[in-house]
Amino acid sequence: MSKICQITGKKAMVGNNVSHSKRRTKRKFNVNLFTKKFYWVEQDMWISLTISAAGLRTINKLGLNAAMTQAAEKGYLQGADIKVIGF
């Protein structure tokens, strides 16, 4: 799976390393991603999501179900992307 947050849609940005002599070389700014397990109360199952730190704060603020429906509406999360751990 690519390095994209399933809740916020954040992905790596491209920028420059700038040396002391102002030479510029390309680099990537990666997202702070990690895999986390959640208990989805509405479906009564455990799921695993690849989310960023900002995505975790979004889940804490809105709730898991609301954050997942919002991500699905924006196209960041498809049903096949959700990894079901147990029922």
Image (cartoon, rainbow, N blue to C red):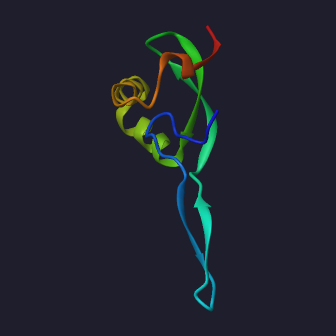
Residue at screen point 35% across, 34% down: 62
Along the line of sight, which residue is nearer the eye, 19 or 69? 19
Which residue is rendered at x = 47% and y = 15% of the image?
A: 41
Q: Where is residue 63 drawn, in percent x and y? A: 39, 30
In the image: residue 52, left or right of residue 64: right
Q: Quadrant of the N terminus?
A: top right
**Place of residue 48 in the rendered image (x, y in percent of width and height, measured from the top left):** 61, 25
Image coordinates for residue 55, horizontal then vertical, percent:
47, 41
Residue drawn at x 62%, y 37% as measured from the top left: 2
The image quarter containing residue 16 is bottom right
Q: Nearer the viewer, residue 79 or 19?
A: 19
Q: How many marks?
A: 0
Residue 29 point in image, percent of width and height: 57, 60
Residue under the image location 39 percent in, 29 percent down: 75
Near-viewer residue (14 or 47): 14
* 73 shown above or below 21: above
Q: Looking at the picture, does residue 66 appear above or below residue 58?
A: above
Which quadrant is the C terminus positioned in? top right
Which residue of the protein is positioned furthest toward the bottom in this rendering?
21
| Up/down of 17 relative to 13, above or below | below
Residue 59 figure quarter: top left
